[in-house]
Amino acid sequence: MSFRKVTAIIHRNVLVDVEAVLQQAGSGGITVTKVKGYGEYADFYERDWLTTHVRVEIFTTAARADPLAQLIADTAHTGLAGDGIVAILPVERVIRIRTRATVDEGEL
């Protein structure tokens, strides 16, 4: 099985647009989490350098990972510092908790 996890850290204000393009692209599902951190962009004017973003995670097949990552990058791009990142990670196995069954590629 060739699964991937696409993880994106993006601005909160582009989340609605990213969700819409992922739904239109037929992503099987997404997880969205509020996160704080800093990387290339840190808010040096604040005592706490952390900025608030959202993390979008998608489990998908290897063949769909790059196109979905590109959709996210294209949609979330503003050209400003702190636009975020997209990473594609390998996944060994996906198990559905309800059924305890290992997920096949055709199911994602």
Image (tube, rainbow, N blue to C red):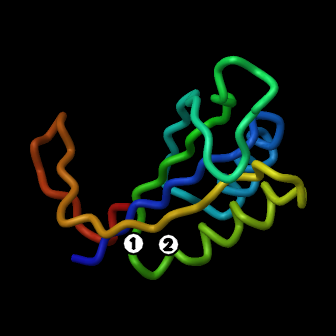
Q: In which quarter of the image is the N terminus?
A: bottom left
Q: Residues within 10 Å of mark 1 (few under 14, many from 20)?
A: many
Q: Is mark 1 on a helix, strand or loop?
A: strand
Q: Which of 35 and 25 is in front in this view?
A: 35
6 w.r.t. 56: above or below = below
Mark 2 to mark 1: distance in Å? 6 Å
At which x and y percent is residue 103? 22, 59
Q: Is mark 2 on a helix, strand or loop?
A: helix
Q: Can you identify the residue that label 1 sits on?
A: 61
Q: Which amino acid does label 2 sit on?
A: Ala
Q: Is residue 87 left or right of residue 67?
A: left
Give the residue drawn at x 69%, y 17%: 47
Name, please, the residue furthest toward the right.
79
Q: Is residue 12 left or right of residue 58?
A: right
At which x and y percent is residue 32? 55, 36
Q: In this view, does 44 lie to the left or right of 5?
A: right
Mark 2 and 1 residues: CB-CB less than 8 Å, in contact?
A: yes
Give the residue drawn at x 53%, y 31%: 33
At which x and y percent is residue 14? 81, 43
Name, please, the residue furthest toward the top.
47
